[in-house]
Image (cartoon, grey):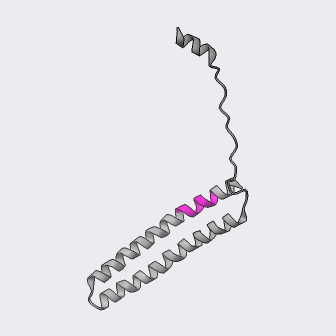
Amino acid sequence: MLLSHLSDVVVAAPIPNPAAVDPTGGSSAIQLLISYVKWGVLIVCGVVAVASGAYMAWGSMSDRPDAAHKGKRAFLFSALGVLASAVAIPMINAVQSAAG
């Protein structure tokens, strides 16, 4: 009895679906900061790749297999960082262009 009364009282209203709004309000400073971060990530990955190559060479030449192994791991992680940023940067660009 109570459920039939409640179904009569509750009216199904449509749920609003507002359009997407840019949370920065079109601020060019936020976009500049994001672009600096994107380039910074790529630069850091490149520097780590070169430094890890030098670390591998130093470890091999000085008969320090631990150093060569750490250099190989650092090179692998820098390559993974480049791969991750190569996927993330186009996604960020797509979101920025959709919001603007």
Q: Which residues are magenta?
A: 87-94
Left or right, 81 with reference to 8? left
- The percent position of residue 86, horizontal first and vertical second, equals 53, 65
In the image, farthest residue toward the top = 1
| Residue 81 in the image: above or below residue 8 | below
The percent coordinates of residue 60 (x first, y second) are 30, 87
- Provide residue 10's location: percent of width, then percent of height: 62, 19
Give the side of residue 33 with respect to residue 55, left or right.
right
Instruction: Reply yes or no: does residue 91 show up in magenta.
Output: yes
Magenta span: helix, strand or loop, mainly?
Answer: helix
Q: Nearer the viewer, residue 82 or 36?
A: 36
* Front-most of residues 99 and 6: 6
Toward the front, the furthest residue is 2
Q: Is residue 47 left or right of residue 10?
A: left
Query: Measuring 39% from the left and 75% from the top, which residue is drawn there?
Result: 74
Q: At x 59% / y 61%, what residue is drawn?
A: 90
**In the figure, 27 relative to 65: above or below?**
above
Furthest residue to the bottom?
62
